[in-house]
Image (cartoon, rainbow, N blue to C red):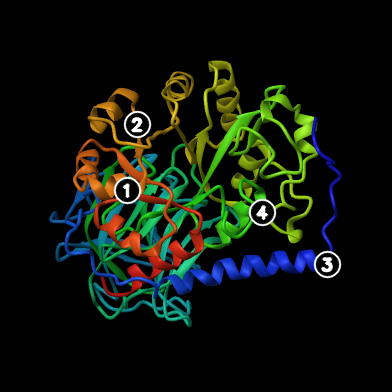
Amino acid sequence: MTKHRTARSGTGRGRRLTLVALVLAVLCGLVAVFLVHRTPSPELRPVAAPAVKGERVVVEDFSGAGLPDGWKPAGGDWKVEDGRLVGAPGGGGQPGRIVFGRHLTDFRLETTARIGGGGGAAPTGDAAPWLALGVDVPASGATPWSVGALRAGAAQGGLLEFARRTDRDTWDVTDKAALPAAAGGDRDVRLAVEVHGTRARWFLDGREALRTSRLTRTADGGQALLVDGARVSFDDVRVTKLGANPLLRPAGSPMAVIAHRGASSSAPENTLVSDEVARRGGAEWIENDVQPSKDGVPYVLHDTAVDRTTDGTGPIRSLTAAEVDALDAGSWFGPAYAGVRVPTLAAQLDDLRRRGGNMLLEIKGRHSRAEVARIVEEVRDHGMTGRVVVQSFDVDALKHTRALAPELPLGLLRAELDLDPVAVARELGLSTYNPPAGELLAHPGLAKSLHAAGVAVTVWTVDDATRWNSLEALGADGIITNRPAELSGWNAGRLHGEH
């Protein structure tokens, strides 16, 4: 039996309150930058993020007389001069481009670049010169391309972007940020883009400056360099094939912001509105829980019973999908959220696929192999296998997932450390080992040993800004938090301020 389930439609005042909550959640991240002293505590030994490890697919220093084998110009003028590759734009408003490498799902493309090198500027009518690291470009060099672009000297002071050049020769810019340092004037800058499927990070002189979860990938696109608005010279181009671990923090990157049940301090937990608040607050990952209804439909809910977070009663496994769909999952948090529903896993996956973001999906409690199979089916049907990490306290649930979907990364939740976390991680094929924050603080060598095995460390659940600094110093790759906007703001302060 359940309580009265009549949904109440949101009033105009309720909608205004929701908008206010969204705005406040984003703005409060700026406050967090000033909450903590940014020097690691003296008793902690800082642990660097893992260095780049993997198979070197391309290593080129342009020491030969001509273009290296396998480097194919597809537009513009390309030549080797004084031990550097020099590229100039083509005619007709087309950027210069040269393709190389091969299709990779997980890789890092890096180079040293100098805008204006090799003969100075070559105006093409563009307001600002730009270059791009092509991370998914056809071997022909024809559109569409997916690139990380650097626009120097633009009206905004310079920009970094992730963008796609469509087959209609228009730009679709998914993410952008102000250029954190000067990149023109014949100065060498070290550039890198690290790609994991549809996720990517932009690095400038060894520090992360921008990231995206919306990179468009194809089945065969390779790497390329692109230039426009000026001549650009390149040196020391490297492409490194990486392991497929989406949570392992690259050197120069901040910790991943993982929103616990969405932005659960600002909106009703485990709902689509909570996910949206988290996204607007800068969270790259949404952590949510999944459990089945009586008739086997996976729903996003933390508690075994619906009583605390809805107007219903009883275990979710005792309610049909129709009964769960009728529940009000927002009024308990505040009148502005009246009528918010308990989302199905399918609805949440669809929302993330369309709006952006990744999911750290906890299989809550014991699940049969058939129940895990239904979860896997939903993830695959929504094309989200590259954007979901499955975690659980239940080892059997992880074993079922690995057997059914070896392509899905796995995380083991623990309340206390295993005697040998590395051995457990290897046995279960983990991508991330997820203890409470206190366990990492009590065992400073944990991250170093797991990183050596290629395993990330994701800690839960930390809302206290005074602890983030210590956890970062000890090598945490990600923080699960109820306050994602504040952690995003703190990360921004770390990236653009002094360490």
Residue flagged by tag 1: what amino acid is it? Answer: Gly
Residue flagged by tag 2: what amino acid is it? Answer: Leu
Q: Which residue is mark 1?
A: 438
Q: Which residue is mark 2?
A: 430
Q: Do tag 4 and tag 1 residues touch (Cβ < 8 Å)?
A: no
- Of marks 2 and 1, which one's residue comes earlier in the chain? 2
x then y, percent, for residue 472: 29, 57
Residue drawn at x 79%, y 50% is: 339
- What's the distance in space between the residues labelled 3 and 2, CA to CA? 47 Å
- Of marks 3 and 4, which one's residue comes earlier in the chain? 3
- Of marks 4 and 1, which one's residue comes earlier in the chain? 4
Q: Is residue 34 left or right of residue 323?
A: left
Q: Secondary structure at mark 1?
A: helix
- Residue 382 versus residue 317: which sits nearer the camera? 317
Q: Is residue 169 visible?
A: no
Quadrant in the rendering for residue 138: top left
Query: Which label was assigned to residue 273?
Result: 4
Q: Which residue is mark 3?
A: 12
